[in-house]
Amino acid sequence: MANVLNYLPELEADEMAFVQGFFQNFNEQQAQQFTDIYRLRRKRPEIILFTSLLGFIGFAGIQRFVVGDIGLGILYFFTAGLCFIGTIVDVINYRRIAFNANVKEAQRTHILVMGQAGGSF
């Protein structure tokens, strides 16, 4: 059983707790493969905060495009971040936005790693 802290020490506590559930079933090779893929795909909370702040200078919605919420990104873009209210909410909740996006990426990465393990037998 691999420990997520050894592979992804940069994760925040809630994200680490979520990802640890996947690591319980991984061997060392799968843990390393998951780490390599997930590290490239995960969204850092700092990037979400920075892109949210760009909404105040005319680039509203970028943070939503970054996390894959294309519909909300388009809505924010054409409504100036819902008259800045949505942008303010996103600035306050940037960690939650990143966590939710990373949960989806972790699930996709887990499926990918387990699918490759199943196909190798």
Image (spheres, rainbow, N blue to C red):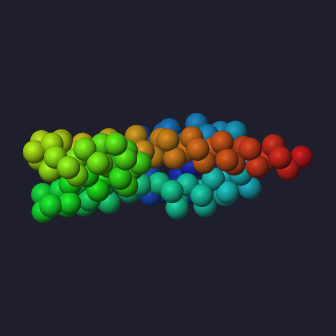
- In the picture, measured across the screen, residue 89 lies left or right of residue 4, that is left
- In the picture, measured across the screen, residue 95 lies left or right of residue 102, that is left
Query: As rendered, which of 8 and 73 lies closer to the eye?
Result: 73
Visible residue check, residue 50: yes
Measuring from the top left, give residue 65's x and y in whole percent: 35, 53
Residue under the point 42% across and 45% down: 101
Measuring from the top left, give residue 47's x and y in whole percent: 32, 60
Query: As rendered, which of 77 and 107 lies closer to the eye?
Result: 77
- Taking the view exactly as shown, the residue that stands out farthest to the right is 121
Measuring from the top left, give residue 115's x and y in whole percent: 74, 44
Residue under the point 11% across and 47% down: 84
Measuring from the top left, give residue 81's x and y in whole percent: 17, 47
Residue under the point 18% across and 56% down: 55
Q: What quarter of the picture does the N terminus occupy?
A: top right
Q: Quadrant of residue 53?
A: bottom left
Number of numbered tags placed on the structure image: 0
Visible residue check, residue 1: no
In this rendering, is residue 110 above or below 37? above
- In the picture, measured across the screen, residue 30 lies left or right of residue 86, that is right
Query: As rendered, which of 30 and 107 lies closer to the eye?
Result: 107
